[in-house]
Amino acid sequence: MSSPQAPEDGQGGGDPPRDLRSVLVTSVLNLEPLDEDLFRGRNYWIPKSKRLFGGQIMGQALVAAAKSVSEDVQVHSLHCYFVRAGDPKVPVLYQVERTRTGASFSVRSVKAVQHGRPIFICQASFQQAQPSPIQHQFSMPTVPPPEVLLDFDTLLDQYLRDPNLQKKYRVGLNRIAAQDVPIEIKLVNPPTPSQMQNMEPKQMFWVRARGYIGEGDIKMHCCVAAYISDYAFLSTALLPHRWNHKVAPGGWSVGSCGVGMGSWLYPVPRRA
């Protein structure tokens, strides 16, 4: 797995850089090797919860795992558990255990540690590319292409221009608008801020990393996909309970909860 060059940003424990629109690969997912199978990750975007973004920990852990396997295998599954809230004031150490290295499959266990205690654990399985006549997947839903949808920044600005927007929503949306995240999101059928009825726990949106992340390194694209996957996980799960929790569209992380989640990363070229 290639290692992009990180800029000299002078980050200590993780003060956010001035521009998050181009650092996802060069900084956020660029780990510092400390020893064999031991890496240090810096903290960048800090959500309004003031705890580490779960997607950052997932993405960095997968980067650490990918650095311990051969170039000819690709990640095809990732199972994660968030066991403690992450502290944005200090870096995260990633300890990789080479659980198994086989002819076709390799398994890596990764533990993310802060203050001497694990905050996150995961297992990643890697597989050699092997053609198979047995393949299936869900059909792509019929949705508008991203080119005709409003980006998240424009959508928030549209909400905030509404003179009838209640003050409690205006305060929350202004906080979201002030966050500079390295992800570009375009929601399909976005709700209005005052839409408080319970909804089905399902959201559809186009998403991609901001900035150029390269073409050839499929492992890195999977790491970016892992980073992105946590962005709207909890907000989607809470949509049936909007009346009680006033969930804003997108933007919640599971990184501050004791939550387990799994991802299947299919062995097809995956680009984020």
Image: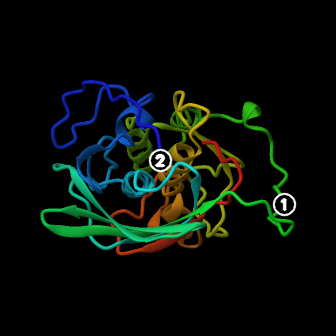
Q: Which mark is residue 197?
A: none
Quadrant of the rendered structure where residue 132 is? bottom right
Quadrant of the rendered structure where residue 21 is? top left
Residue that numbered label 2 is attached to: 166
Residue at position x 56%, y 31% from top?
Answer: 214
Residue at position x 30%, y 54% from top?
Answer: 52
> Residue 137, percent across and down?
80, 64
Apparent side of residue 248 relative to residue 17 in the rendered image (left or right): right
Closer to the chain start, of discs 1 and 2, is 1
Q: Is residue 265 depicted above or below 206 in this figure? A: below
Apparent side of residue 269 relative to residue 22 in the rendered image (left or right): right
Q: Residue furthest left?
A: 115
Query: What secondary structure is found at the residue carrying circle 2?
Result: loop
Query: What secondary structure is found at the residue carrying circle 1?
Result: loop
Measure the C-alpha gap from mark 1 to mark 2: 39 Å
Residue that numbered label 1 is attached to: 139
